[in-house]
Amino acid sequence: MNQESISQSIAVVHPITLSHGRNAQVWDTDGKRYIDFVGGIGVLNLGHCNPAVVEAIQAQASRLTHYAFNAAPHGPYLELMDQLQRFVPLSYPLAGMLTNSGAEAAENALKVARGATGKRAIIAFDGAFHGRTLATLNLNGKVAPYKQRVGDLPGPVYHLPYPSVDTGVTCEEGLKALERLFSVELAVEDVAAFILEPVQGEGGFLALDPAFAQALRRFCDEHGILIIIDEIQSGFGRTGQRFAFPRLGIEPDLLLLAKSIAGGMPLGALVGRQDLMAALPKGGLGGTYSGNPIACAAALASLAQMTDENLATWGERHEQAIVGRYQRWQAAGLSTALGRLTGVGAMRGIELVNADGSPAPAHLAKVLASARAKGLLLMPSGKARHIIRLLAPLTIEPEVLEEGLDILEQCLVELG
């Protein structure tokens, strides 16, 4: 297919053209079948063309395709916000707004944080990814390719090391970096919020140290600083439960949602403490397409399937299959390129390394191409693009999951 009309600044991981999909499988325009371990980059936890989601979309499309909520409210928006209040496991009453994307949710969180605190500075973490808009670019903990050639970005934003067993940065080292930041670069009274991912997605499925998260929560409470938690990729069952932040033993003040919230439809949300979400004046939040009725209907159909029982079952099945297979590979010395297994629950990454243990993006490039030729789609991640992130739909059939892991095994053997 001719792609001359597509911007060459868009990088495509897999040079194929997809035609259709069903649960964890997709087909290209040549009729070739692939097992999908990408899932629209974490958007399709319930699979391609989930029957209940499709039915909800079709039914809503015959009633009301669009209305701007800030012009006149509509039922699907109201019902979804009510359901989100029940679904998000917070101890306090929450309020929120719907957005078109995760990046838009993050942008609005920055507005709310500034409006509520009267402060401007935001602190993010190395390896973070929060979006591609100008403000979220500045939050990202990585320059190439996101920040190159775009000039000055909205700020002020500062970055800290990300404490995690996966990064080798300890809780103590993270707290020392925090202390240094406030003694050298920034006055603590100028900080509006910290923003963090409980499990970094683009960063390589790196899990935040719970002890650091709890120390940070105490610090923020002492100094009147908000914590924004980004669950855009880790939420809606990806780690085996509704969200990943309960694993940290803390609650956010503001929570960012998107990706698998709506079964593939473009939708995001910002939710948080009611007083914070009322901090801006009337008209300070909103958007023409935010909370489109069809997207809301898809989200309602998705949430109805995300019971704690289903999420636990799906997550346990994923975790057992991936961790069990990885352990067998490791024990058998399957490949010298096999590095660490990162992440938690069903949110897992496989690191590829050189003989000296350094990141091996060249190995990952070979695996991506080889797996695609064999009928498996994979997605890279990590600062050096050396970590395979596994994002198969949670609803994948067990035999299809095993088939995909078989293909990945063959690709790793080929690396030697």
Image: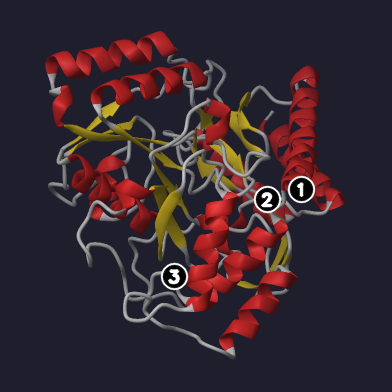
Q: Along the polypeptide, which appears first: circle 2 or circle 3? A: 3
**Whether residue 146 can be seen here:** no
Closer-to-camera residue (286/55): 286
How many residues crowd around disc 1 within 10 Å: few (fewer than 14), some, or many (20 or more)? many
Give amino acid for label 3.
Gly
Q: Residue at x 48, y 49 (%)?
A: 232
Q: Earlier in the sequence, mark 2 or mark 1?
A: 2
Q: Cα distance, mark 1 to mark 3?
A: 35 Å
SS at badge 3: loop
Marks 2,1: beta carbons within 8 A: yes
Q: Tell me the residue that label 3 is attached to.
A: 291
Q: Nearer the viewer, residue 42 or 354?
A: 42
Residue drawn at point x = 37 percent, y = 55 percent: 105
The picture places residue 180, in percent across and down from the top left corner, at 21, 13
Q: Is residue 166 above or below residue 81?
A: above
First along the sequence among labels 1 and 3:
3
Give the labeled residue for mark 1. 404
Three-letter code, disc 1: Gly
Q: Which mark is residue 392?
A: 2
* Gap between marks 2 and 1 measured at Cα: 9 Å
Q: Quadrant of the C terminus?
A: top right
Q: Secondary structure at mark 1?
A: helix
* Circle 2: element type: loop
- Residue 374 placement (x, y as % from top left): 73, 53
| 360 left or right, relative to 7 | right
Q: What amino acid is found at the position of numbered circle 2 in the picture?
A: Ala
Percent of width and height locating residue 317: 80, 40
